[in-house]
Image: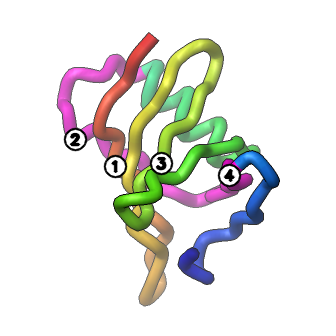
Amino acid sequence: MTAALPREAFGNGQVWMRLPEARVIDLSRQAPREHLARLRAALESGVWAEPDLRRAEFYDAVVRGYRYCFYVAPAGAGRPARVFLLATMR
């Protein structure tokens, strides 16, 4: 795990992620704005996420009945972490 991201592991493989200043970017360019806002709010307050064991910094999180697949680019050099939304599923 990257030290720049405040996370802690849970016994079932999920991690607690809290990224209060993260910028959420929609790579699919198809997600409605409310999905971006919902994911951003969840990351600001903290959310359980399931890491992709084959790809570093890729996660899935379920928020209000939607599964969000995203990549986290760690913070660095005075800029907050960036979260790239890859897909949204019901």
* Mark 4–mark 1 CB contact (< 8 Å): no
Image disc number at residue 59: 3
Q: CA distance from mark 4 to mark 3?
A: 11 Å
Image disc number at residue 13: 4
x and y, in percent, of residue 4 in the image: 58, 79
Q: CA distance from mark 3 to mark 1?
A: 10 Å
Q: Amino acid at mark 3?
A: Tyr
Whether 66 is drawn above or below 55: the answer is above
**Residue pointed to by mark 2:** 27
Q: Magenta span covers which residues?
A: 13-33
Q: Secondary structure at mark 1?
A: strand
Image disc number at residue 6: none
* Mark 1–mark 2 CB contact (< 8 Å): yes
Q: Look at the image and say whether residue 27 sits in the magenta stretch.
A: yes
Which quadrant holds the N terminus?
bottom right
Q: Nearer the viewer, mark 3 or mark 1?
A: 3
Whether 38 is drawn above or below 20: the answer is above
